[in-house]
Amino acid sequence: MGGIEQLLAKLPLEMRQAILSADIPEKDCIEEIRIRIGSPVMLIHGGREHRLNGKYGQPAESKLIQDIFNSIMDHSAYAYQDELSKGYITIEGGHRVGVCGKVIMEAGSIKAMKDISSLNLRRSREIIGISDALLPCLFDGSGSFLHTIIVSPPMCGKTTLLRDLIRNLSRNGFRVGVCDERSEIAGCYRGIPSFDLGDRTDIMDGCPKGEGMLMLIRGMSPEIIATDEIGKPGDLVGIEGALCSGVGLLTTIHGKEFAELIGSSIGNLVSKGVFKRMIYLSNKPKIGTITAITDEVNKRLL
């Protein structure tokens, strides 16, 4: 069943059996497992919610959530303290577990979390080859890579497409530096990537994008830098550094349309025509559907 097994392994045996017997096709296509205090366990599959039957169709108790949380943390929340302060942790296989609860602050920063109330086990997927047909669109007539941004709302497949584009670029001879601030692109677990990003790819894991991009430029001489979900002020520092060094950019952002990007934190870059290729994704009729590819002035190419 592929990647879903790694998520199921963190759950009680009885819950695993309930999920595997749920009346949904292709269990390996489950996208999320959501567990909330006072609510039934929900599976997200094909963008739709499916409520578990039987025991786990009843309101979940805090003990169940705490037991699963402890299992995910290998009974050592301290070891994951830095990740927890961001609201999630990355587990083996590159899967992400979102966590909600009582936040403990210290000196204006998040120190820890207790009284866990919600867990979202979000499956990470690798789909080899989904970018094959797309790749030629990202180069100019001289064979130079064009700065590219993937645009979509959450849960539309941005990271999955980004991951395969990185693999393809690397396999086609480009040195790619990946700044994986959230450990989601490569899915590094204890330093080892969970996904195939190619033979010429260097990964800066868990590092803020602004600093990470500059570190990659100085230390690894990439031809292309890839990162996900830009938008914070610090990210722009790294982007400017990449532009000044002649490195290609491959990144993603939450959004739906060109006008929305103009009004976003990267609006100045978009207005200047930095991104020569913009790939728009949707989850209809299925996750990863490419709805449009445009150039820097929003002229539709596909």
Image (cartoon, grey):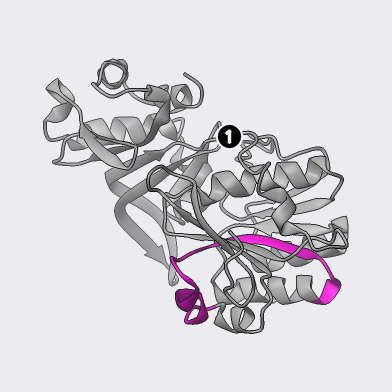
- For image coordinates 43% across by 72% down, the residue present is 108
Quarter of the image holding residue 236? bottom right
| Residue 235 image offset from top left, x and y in percent | 62, 71
| Residue 12 image offset from top left, x and y in percent | 31, 21
Quarter of the image holding residue 266? bottom right
Residue 49 in view: yes
Residue 12 in magenta?
no
Considering the image in quadrants, where does the C terminus appear? Answer: bottom right
Quarter of the image holding residue 47? top left
- For image coordinates 69% across by 35% down, the residue present is 196
* Left or right: residue 265 compared with residue 13: right
Residue 259 in magenta?
yes
* Left or right: residue 272 compared with residue 9: right
Q: Is residue 26 above or below residue 88?
A: above
Residue 208 in view: no
37 or 20, which is in the foreground?
20
* Left or right: residue 183 compared with residue 9: right
| Residue 278 image offset from top left, x and y in percent | 60, 64
Report the amino acid beneath label 1: Ile
Q: Residue beneath label 1, please?
A: 127
Q: Is residue 288 above or below residue 276?
A: above
Image label count: 1
Q: Which residues are magenta?
A: 244-265
Q: Considering the numbered disc 1 on the image, is that residue within a helix, a strand or a loop?
A: loop
- For image coordinates 41% across by 30% down, the residue present is 29
Q: Is residue 166 above or below residue 265?
A: above
39 or 68, which is in the foreground?
39
- For image coordinates 81% across by 77% down, the residue present is 244
| Residue 227 image offset from top left, x and y in percent | 64, 57
Q: Residues within 10 Å of mark 1 (few under 14, many from 20)?
A: few
